[in-house]
Image (tube, coloured by chain):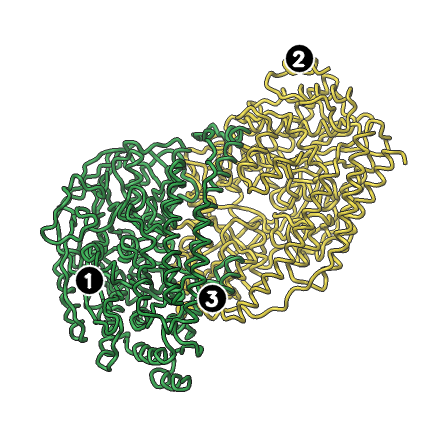
Chain colours: A green, B yellow
Amino acid sequence: MRSFVAGLTLLASTAYAVNPSDVPLRGYSAEHSATEVQWEQKFRALPEPERLRETMRRLSARPHHVGSPYDKDNAEWLVAQLKSYGLDAKIELQEALFPTPKLRKLELLGVDKFEAKLEEPTLKIDPTSDQKKEQLPTYNAYSRDGDVTAPLVYVNYGAPADYEELEKMGISVKGAIVIARYGQTWRGIKPKVAAEHGAVGCLIYSDPRDDGYFRGDSYPDGPMRPSEGAQRGSVMDMPVYPGDPQTPGIGAVAGTKLIPLDQVQTITKIPVLPISYADATPFLKSLKGELVPESWRGGLPFAYKVGPSVAKAHLALAFNWDRKPLYNVIAKIPGTTLADQWVIRGNHHDGWVNGAGDPVSGASAELEEARGLGELLKQGWRPQRTILYCFWDGEEPALLGSTEWVESHAAELSEHAVAYFNSDGNSRGYFRAEGSSSLENFVDSVVKDIEDPETKMTVWKRERLVAISKASADTRSELRSRADLRMEALGSGSDYTAFIHHLGIASVNLGYGGEDQGGGQYHSIYDDFYWYTHFMDTDFAYGRALAQTAGTMMMRMADADVIPFQFGNVADTVKTYVTGVKKLADTMRAEVKERNTEINDGVYKALEDPKKKRVAPTVETLPPYLNFAPLDQAVDDLTTAASDYDKAFTASALKAPLTLNPKLIQSERAFLDPAGLPNRSWFQNMMYAPGFYTGYGVKTLPAARETIEQKQWKDVDAQIARTAAAVEREAAMLMQATQILTGK
Amino acid sequence: MRSFVAGLTLLASTAYAVNPSDVPLRGYSAEHSATEVQWEQKFRALPEPERLRETMRRLSARPHHVGSPYDKDNAEWLVAQLKSYGLDAKIELQEALFPTPKLRKLELLGVDKFEAKLEEPTLKIDPTSDQKKEQLPTYNAYSRDGDVTAPLVYVNYGAPADYEELEKMGISVKGAIVIARYGQTWRGIKPKVAAEHGAVGCLIYSDPRDDGYFRGDSYPDGPMRPSEGAQRGSVMDMPVYPGDPQTPGIGAVAGTKLIPLDQVQTITKIPVLPISYADATPFLKSLKGELVPESWRGGLPFAYKVGPSVAKAHLALAFNWDRKPLYNVIAKIPGTTLADQWVIRGNHHDGWVNGAGDPVSGASAELEEARGLGELLKQGWRPQRTILYCFWDGEEPALLGSTEWVESHAAELSEHAVAYFNSDGNSRGYFRAEGSSSLENFVDSVVKDIEDPETKMTVWKRERLVAISKASADTRSELRSRADLRMEALGSGSDYTAFIHHLGIASVNLGYGGEDQGGGQYHSIYDDFYWYTHFMDTDFAYGRALAQTAGTMMMRMADADVIPFQFGNVADTVKTYVTGVKKLADTMRAEVKERNTEINDGVYKALEDPKKKRVAPTVETLPPYLNFAPLDQAVDDLTTAASDYDKAFTASALKAPLTLNPKLIQSERAFLDPAGLPNRSWFQNMMYAPGFYTGYGVKTLPAARETIEQKQWKDVDAQIARTAAAVEREAAMLMQATQILTGK
């Protein structure tokens, strides 16, 4: 068998790594595994860089945001392509609220009067940068309307910790317009936290330290953001719920009952506008007061002051609050024996403007996968499970398309969805995956079979070695000894959100990157074909690698006899979460204790500087010790159950009855609590969520962790208990699965 | 007794802290201690901020560098002042080589031709900035003459580690002119290391990230360096020996035999010129090649590239290689019963230009001390020991005045010098002292009696609390439990160098600072009265505190019956040095081992990026285990000896025979090895030295440490043994001292 496989490998492509041992693929019989390996190898020979280039040229040829003519045109073109590959493809129409600007005005009043241009200029060398009529102007979607005049205060990245620092400096933003820089925290957090602190408006600018000349040459000499480049983007309060603001939890189609606009919770409380650093400079220079802390200083050539400004800023914004159609493209490959088990792949197709990097670099790879699978179908391959290829609309404003689609199909998906594989913008470099730890072993098994285009080693090996090169001594030791590479948990920021956080569908977000500076044209008119093909994955080698990787995952998951989830890693991972939350509580307690000691010893008195205003902290009650016993118990139970399952699986998987798969499908669902997270019931997964104050960044065991972070001490034990219950449900599900396997 | 002291305190000044317990001052009988406390309190009431201001106005009124008319004028004025206080003052004339520029030319050739201005402009608001005829131009003293034309390479701070990074990037500086930024490492290291790597010229510029607008508003709006400001300074290879390059180890006076110029070792091997960032910008922008590592990027508004440049730079420098007189001012207060024991105080009086901050802020405090002691003499106070107040000339070029004076008086000083107390530029904020750990307890005892002008707590308490606020958890715990605050060891950078490193005289360097951004006009024409009185210690409260602090140290050391050295801290400190050197060796071994593993595992292969040039490291032989046994033994012996001495001292110090003091004077001398450090025999103290490749920054146990750092493995054990022998000499000295004390 082995030699046959090796021979076929040589025929198909000399460069592919082969399944390196005689151990069959997890969830496959030896015989079935050998066939699968052959089909996968055939598949991986199919994606073509030249096609990826032409798909990108086509999809990014004109601006294609939600509601634009070319957005619909692209959706229709995708359907036609998918049909031409032999797939059953169609547009599923949803709809959502999508505001666009009708008034944007920003001026600095006073002596040095200045009016912001709010315009990204056409560049002669860049052929699509002149499509002014179709481009969305620079704005933040779901900012409320407003007209405010107020002094400015600089708030660094505008995260909660930045306001704590301001408080120490005796600076209030009450009644002020804050000016925050892009970066660190998700942009929607900036106006949210500013409003909580009493600000009346919010400007977000792109500092050259974060994605301009500090990181490399400015476009078009290099890939980085030029002085007048600005970052569009959503500022909806998505940590509460993403998708259409007027239909939380319900898939919106024409006629769906809507929450009135003035009752929507996720629209910002204050007007927000993104600006370039050319526009930001006069505002920043108008700031008086103290020099900001060193880590707050950006790359502009003057001293950054905290403010307030003497001169006032005037910000006036008004929007068309229209509902727009969402053209989700859904293609289906029906399964054979396990057709009611669905394996789902997705990448969005809408962009803020031309969107070559975001999202077309990922979407074009996804299309190549569909073409490849179409080829295999012609050659006789048939997946056991049903495969769905989805191209989402409206991801940019608020994950609109995927969220509304998931909400529309919630019942079916809860029953049938095995796993969801997501990608988004892709570039050159190292493989990166985040997602459900039940899929860690599976993802590793796939990338052990993918060849890295540059180094010709396996993608898995490169990922592991690069991780070792960056690791601390402790992490390095784990990297060298642990069988699988750890996948980080999913926060938010792309279309997996509704799948994993709302419905509890095991999900992975994957892609390549890390070698080029990719953030420079993020959400700008310059994220286009010229830019991408001059500075990013210019030969589409990594577009091809992404198609090979995600396509192989889809095949291997769809074809397996038994879903190849592995649970030892789940137990191990949840244990690290628990350790992390305990450490958080201990650290907070130690910090308060130390600060109290320092206050009593006179440290803040010693630090007083008559030339600087400082507000010393006051003595605080020590955080209490918390009852982690239910979580400790649950982790122990999960560890035992997972170990029993994995052992039983190894011994008897090939004889597993068909009742096992439906049980396994529920494994991520076990983490759901229908009551959801505190104050945001749409998020039901008790293992992870985007942080309420990070937006994209993940919080693991979020109910427990955020209650601790927010010092709601009396609520913590209850949230720990709910979290423990979710872990216990997972353990119980695994015990049942083991019973099915062992027949006992 | 106590109440009397308290009453007197109220009389002298209501604000002074008193010796907080009934324990007499260390080295004093109870009765003598009480008298001493009274005299010290009287002294501390005398320094006057208004006098400090007027002294600064006078000394900084005109440029006063070595060889200038106003340098001599200041020296003569100081003598007159000191005489008017009743002190026996005179000029001691030494001389030294001091080059000044006759040609400075720097241009960028090629298409974007540019000639550097090399001129700090006059500012209307700053009244002394227009003294162009007397100002030294911007240059680096002891740069060799040269005329070179070559491409440019950017080398970050120009430290050895920066060249290792360049090597990884495949960049050589051979035949190039390097452009380095000021900061991190002492400036003289930059041309030294550049020349070792084959560069033919060196430019050093002031990056706004390090002392320009990144740190605050530019002068004259704020204290920071303006675009055309440049930093003069010495680039002599002082880690080999400081002082007159033509008379190493010998005090130079007219007629001293000179080493011919072409045989001098400490003049640079390549031409060097300091420039402003306005001048540097076209040169930096001409650099091609890769973006530099993130930590290498400065604050200018463009992408920093490593080079080389396509356009060449042309640098032409020629100097007048003249010898110049040095006017050291020495004032003496003869001792009574212990007149052959000298306590020495020093601060330099020469500046690079007007030098208000550096050195006049320190020198004016020193003059106030001398005036105060003159007052006490009039009131009947007489020190037991002889006191010397020294105002050094020629510190700026190469510690010329102090070094030549110390070398001239080497034999007497070796016999008579008890301790040396140095200061230099002073500003507003926290107390800081570095020096011999035998003086740690003494320095602490003094600053427990000084009131901080801003917080009104003792200077010691403020220093300790501020240290706690900045410390890691481990250090914090030590700060809370250790009786004395640790003093860092002395490297170089001011006039203590010849005292502690050449002659082994226990030394302390002290001053106040940390609240204002002081570095902005360092060695510029703008370091003048206008700048200092607008942005630094504007009310001279900390000038007064420095006079109180250093003056009290002089009195308490000069009046003590037994020299109040304490040796438990010496043993404890040497132990931390040994631990540090062992850790260095262990870390180097672990790093090589890890790197070898990573090479063999393919990590560097995995990191290859076809768009970037990288030179992967090669497998290296593991550093050997080293024989630290002699040092471990010596530290044990010293610990026992120090503990025995301190115990015996406490029990019987007041009955100590007069033979004890001369023994104690030798305690720092015990650390000297006449053979000196490897390749630099002028440095004889085996406990500390300025680093051969750091310049100012200290290396403890330098013979052992630097041999390890430089991987001269076969030499290490011998250097450890020599170092251990020095520690054993200290232990033996202490055992003899204990015998004297106990009479056994």
Upstream in the sequence, badge 3 or badge 1? 1
Where residue A550 sits in the image (x, y, percent)? Answer: 31, 68
Circles 3 and 1 on the same subunit:
yes
| Viewer-side residue, B148 vs A355 | A355
Residue B7: numbered disc: 2
Mark 1 and 2 residues: CB-CB less than 8 Å, in contact? Answer: no
Residue B242: numbered disc: none
- Chain that bears disc 2: B
- Dot 3 corresponds to which residue? A483
Task: Report the residue that reaches farthest toward the right.
Answer: B744
Distance (Cα) linking label 1 and label 2: 86 Å
Q: Residue B149: in sight, yes or no?
A: no
The crowd level at tag 1 (other Cα within 10 Å; few <14, some 14-19, many 20+) is many
The crowd level at tag 2 (other Cα within 10 Å; few <14, some 14-19, many 20+) is few
Amino acid, disc 2 = Gly
- The image quarter in which residue B415 lies: top right
Mark 3 and 2 residues: CB-CB less than 8 Å, in contact? Answer: no
Q: Secondary structure at mark 1?
A: loop
- Dot 1 corresponds to which residue? A128
